[in-house]
Amino acid sequence: MGPATATLKVNGKEVGQGRIERSVPAMHTASETFDMGADLGSPVSLDYFDRAPFRFNGKIEKIQIRYTDEKEEDSK
């Protein structure tokens, strides 16, 4: 699937944006999100629905995201 535009927000403020040429098709539901510090998307089971948004109460020191293309991974 793709292309798509990804927007990175910190505390609701946009801090970055980029284009994703290809993505994994049909691996996530439309309601799923990529969250740090809280899971704002759908729970793994309806048994946990009333406990959302599953906030992390610790301190996140660092987040590292590495996006690679298939060719780079295949050469390893």
Image: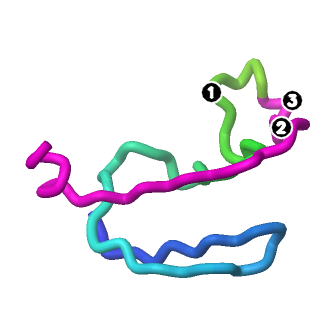
Three-letter residue code for mark 1: Val
N-terminal label among 2 and 3: 3
Q: Note whether 49 is above or below 32 in the view shown.
A: above
Q: Residues within 10 Å of mark 3 (few under 14, many from 20)?
A: few
Mark 3 / mark 1, whichever is N-terminal? 1
Report the magenta residues as a range: 49-76
Foreground residue, 52 or 59?
59
* Viewer-side residue, 5 vs 71: 71
- Residue 71 sits inside the magenta stretch: yes
Q: In this view, does 59 lie to the left or right of 63?
A: right
Q: Main secondary structure of the magenta part?
A: loop
For the point 23% across and 59% down, the residue is 69
Residue 56 shows which numbered tag?
A: 2
Q: Which amino acid is tagged 2? A: Phe
Between marks 2 and 1 in the image, the one whose residue lies nearer the viewer: 2
Q: Which quarter of the figure is the C terminus placed in?
A: top left
Q: Where is residue 55 in the image (x, y as percent from the top left)?
A: 85, 39
Tag 3: amino acid: Arg
